[in-house]
Image (cartoon, rainbow, N blue to C red):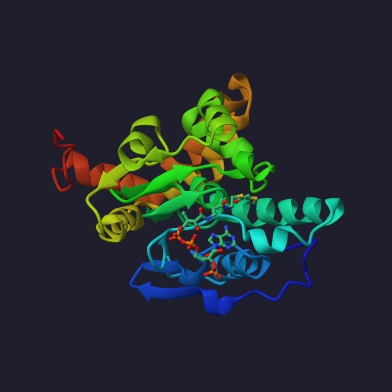
Amino acid sequence: MSSKTHVTPRLDEVQVEHRGAISIVRLCRPHKRNAISDGLIAAIGQRFAELPETTKAVVLAGEGDHFCAGLDLGELQERDAVQGLHHSRSWFYILRELEQGPVPIVAALHGAVVGGGLELAAACHIRVADDTTFFALPEGSRGIFVGGGGAVRIPRLIGVARMTDMMLTGRVYNAQDGERIGLAQYLVPTGQAFDKAMELARQVAKNAPMTNYALTHALPRIAEQPADQGFMTEALMAAIAQSAPEAKERVRAFLEGRAAKVRKA
Ligand code: 1HE
């Protein structure tokens, strides 16, 4: 974390468990509703940086009744402008490492997914919400602004107009409406977000590694490029992916009737 090397990661507040090819990263600060302190964001960065090569997908979850209450507002009070700039940059650095990291991340959401908690979720690749989930950006009412990459990532999910409304008016989206507008791709009954996220992560882990690499590294960049450059990057990525021996074998398996067909949903 370039500008915040003095921060001691609170590794006790971000626990990791490995289940085969899936690693579970869990925010464990439930008494503060998983509010993200400097030590907690540093620990998230360290936990992801230390994932073993055997990890093929991650489920990110929160302990307690809420996924994450956002920035630890207690620490905000002590920061001046320059420290605030470095603080924001440290979030960008860490969340970019998640978004463009080695493996896809499935966020299992429940309860509050607010402020920096929504920014964290937005850096993940798939979001699964259960019925208890609610989404908000209370920064507006706290007199501040997003600062963890939300101004870039959240409009990509829901559009500038909806994010502007959320911050101007304090609008809270419930789970159903959150899924409808694109804050989550999946909506499941209460208490089932983690299991659904695990199921999806297992599916993701079965993909050819180059496909997952293309989705975590190439797609976010292509989406930011002007169309003409994006088409070229896409073509280059496609050429690399299809030339991998694993891609050839998977296509052969389908042609020989050994692979699953796409079934009607
Ligand atoms: C906190 C935080 C926090 C809880 N920073 N301490 N985020 C917010 O503005 C959301 C603020 N939090 C809430 O609205 C509510 O706490 C919740 C809806 C998330 C949960 O409500 P509830 O009733 O379950 O819990 P609680 O009683 O409000 O909170 C329990 C404790 O957690 C309490 O501390 P305690 O010592 O009195 O027990 C709260 O003070 C503490 N707590 N949330 C610090 N956020 C990169 S920039 C991002 C900018 C932002 O994220 S701004 C939005 C911040």
Q: Residue 250 appears at what percent x and percent y?
A: 28, 47
Instruction: Identify the residue at the far top of this view.
Output: 228
Is residue 28 in view from this perspective?
Answer: no
Instruction: Identify the residue at the far bottom of this view.
Output: 12
* Callout count: 0
Question: Where ligand 1 lies, by quadrant?
Answer: bottom right
Relative placement, left or right, of 175 versus 167 is left
For the point 39% across and 67% down, the residue is 64
- In the image shown, does 244 or 57 lie closer to the viewer? 57
Relative placement, left or right, of 261 versus 88 is left
The correct choice, above or below, for 15 with respect to 153 in the image is: below
Q: Residue 35 appears at what percent x and percent y?
A: 55, 62
The correct choice, above or below, for 208 with respect to 155 in the image is: below
For the point 38% across and 54% down, the residue is 111
- In the image shown, does 202 or 183 lie closer to the viewer? 183
Quarter the C terminus occupies: top left
The correct choice, above or below, for 113 with respect to 72 in the image is: above
Is residue 2 in view from this perspective?
Answer: yes
For the point 41% across and 59% down, the residue is 66
Quarter the N terminus occupies: bottom right
For the point 73% across and 72% down, the residue is 7
Q: Residue 220 appears at what percent x and percent y?
A: 55, 38
The correct choice, above or below, for 133 with respect to 74 in the image is: above
Q: Residue 4 appears at what percent x and percent y?
A: 77, 65
- In the image shown, does 2 or 215 lie closer to the viewer? 2
- In the image shown, does 85 or 24 lie closer to the viewer? 85
